[in-house]
Image (cartoon, rainbow, N blue to C red):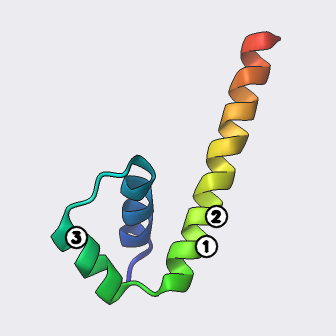
Amino acid sequence: MSVFRVWKAVFWSFFGVRKGRDLESDAAHIKPVHFILAGLLGAVIFVVSLVLLVNWITH
């Protein structure tokens, strides 16, 4: 399991674009806890980025 593989899987799942064989491969090789942690961290980064962008535009 590599960190890059987890982030790649989470990144593409945010967009809803995954090939079936990649999804099956990720499910077989990556632990669910890693998906959950990377997903939560990715969501926090996304929300903070949006808040900072809106603050910058409205300032």
Residue 29's disc is none
**Residue contact at pointers 1 and 3, CB within 8 angstroms:** no
Q: Nearer the viewer, residue 46 or 18?
A: 18
Within 10 Å of the Cα at label 1, are there few (<14), some (14-19), or many (20+) other Cα atoms?
few
Does 4 appear above or below 30?
Answer: above
Residue identified by numbered label 2 = 40
Residue 22's disc is 3
**Disc 1 or 3, which lies upstream in sequence?**
3
Q: Secondary structure at mark 1?
A: helix
Q: Residue furthest left?
A: 21
Q: Nearer the viewer, residue 51 or 5?
A: 51
- Alpha-carbon distance for marks 1 and 3? 20 Å
Does 45 appear above or below 22?
Answer: above
**Disc 2 or 3, which lies upstream in sequence?**
3
Residue, x 24% and y 79% (percent of image)? 24
- Alpha-carbon distance for marks 2 and 3? 21 Å
x, y percentage for residue 32? 49, 84
**Residue contact at pointers 1 and 2, CB within 8 angstroms:** yes
Residue, x 64% and y 61% (percent of image)? 41
The amino acid type, in three-letter code, at marker 1 is Leu
The amino acid type, in three-letter code, at marker 2 is Leu
The reply, left or right, for residue 54 in relation to residue 19 is right
The amino acid type, in three-letter code, at marker 3 is Asp
Quarter in which the C terminus is drawn? top right
Residue, x 39% and y 78% (percent of image)? 2
| The quadrant where residue 40 appears | bottom right
Quarter in which the N terminus is drawn? bottom left
- Alpha-carbon distance for marks 1 and 2? 5 Å
Q: Nearer the viewer, residue 22 or 4?
A: 22
**Residue contact at pointers 2 and 3, CB within 8 angstroms:** no
Residue identified by numbered label 1 = 37
